[in-house]
Amino acid sequence: MKSVTIVGAGLAGHASAKALRLQGFDGRVTIIGDEIHRPYDRPPLSKDFLAGAAQADELTLEAEGEDLQAEWLLGARAASLDPGDRQITLTDGGIVRSDVVIIASGSFARCLPGVPAGVHTLRTLDDAIALRAELVSGALLVVVGSGFIGLEVASTARSLGLEVTVLGSSGNPLSRSLGVEVGTAVQRLHEANGIVVRNNTVVEAVLGSERVIGVRLSTGEMIPADVVVMGIGSLPAIEWLSNSGLDIRGGLMCDEVGATAADGVIGVGDCSAWFDPVRGRHHRVEHWSDSRERPATAVAALLSGRPPARGVRPSYLWSDQCGAKIQFAGRVMGDETIAIEAGDIDSGDLLMVYRQAERPVAVVGINQPRLVAQWRKRLASLETG
């Protein structure tokens, strides 16, 4: 193996290039990125960057003096892949061939079609720049979706003096993924900071011709807005693989170390769905920690020809909202029993443990960083033990 092409210049793509060099690969590395920007960190986009407390040059993922000795093709978009020849065709007609292809093309934000100006999604640095310009004190912001991104944007916008309404389709914010108890605590946290949270809503239409003026719910109610943020999830950026013959149902299907059914083609990051031996099925994970850590696992298997001794650690994510730190670690499948083991919902500071047949499988903490750190270690030891 003398050459590797990485499609994607985000967290997973950058982590893949670093892993190749750190693990001794000295061949040619080509990195294709559809944005013009060098690799940057996305979590601050909805928080410090959006608030104006951080600038673009502070988001870089590259360490000072870092040189991956890679050829960077930025502002270039992959159009198709021939897995047999490991040949990538770009939208401008360019061709890139290599011995191995690492697909780290990420995901893109869902949005309603044909929306007017003032309606935003938040996935890229350019998205954040455009949204930041419109977050003016006193403006009316409607956030559609009560997941992590939507809630972080709501929190930041409220701190900037906007009047914020969050429209969620579930019973409570985050309740579908983390349960009613966490959802209730998070909702109270936002409401205590002056954010209006409405649950079980369905946005039927975005109103306005040239500029957004509000949204209409399925009940017929109109909610006025100067700015609308769509936080309704993401889709894996794998449409360019549609004619490749690879299995892309629900993400790029990979084994438990990132290999696809095609020799020399690997998937990492948001676009991939690795086989999870704990779940017994493929599972797409969009957490920052997985996109940073899994490429090292995939590269180790690629270079050695065998799986690494240590498997992938349990997922971890964090979210800063309304002055509180929300942390999650582990795996949740939806059939766990949940117990509050520190704090309570009313105080907003709590630790909840998820169990399957008395075995701890996940933990959520709100303002409980010390206990979450202890549980992360325990969960990791339970999986390896």
Image: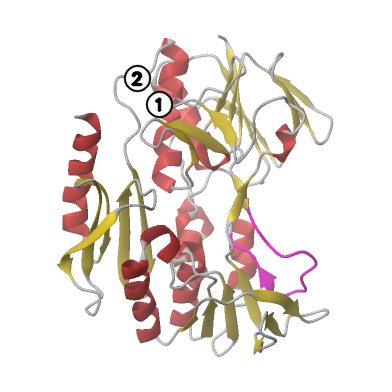
Report the residue at 59% width, 54% height from top. Answer: 234
Give the structural element (helix, strand or loop) at label 1: helix
Which of disc 1 and disc 2 is earlier in sequence? 1
Question: Is residue 52 in view?
Answer: no
Report the residue at 30% width, 65% height from top. Answer: 325
For disc 1, the neighbor class at 10 Å (few under 14, some 14 to 19, many from 20) is many
Q: Nearer the viewer, residue 137 or 345?
A: 345
Q: Nearer the viewer, residue 106 or 219?
A: 219
User: Is 318 inside the magenta-drawn segment?
Assistant: no
**Which of the numbered marks, if any, corresponds to residue 305?**
none
Report the residue at 39% width, 77% height from top. Answer: 187
Residue annotated with mark 1: 297
Q: Nearer the viewer, residue 38 or 5?
A: 5
Measured along the vertical axis of the image, is residue 284 above or below residue 348? above
Magenta region, mostly helix, strand or loop?
loop
Measured along the vertical axis of the image, is residue 369 above or below residue 185? above
Give percent across and percent down for residue 200: 53, 76
Give percent across and percent down for residue 58: 46, 55
Is the C terminus in the top left, top right, bottom left or bottom right quadrant? Answer: top left
Give percent across and percent down for residue 302: 47, 16
Measured along the vertical axis of the image, is residue 143 above or below residue 254? below
Amino acid type of the residue tagged 2 in the rendering: Pro
User: Is 118 inside the magenta-drawn segment?
Assistant: yes
**Which of the numbered marks, if any, corresponds to residue 308?**
2
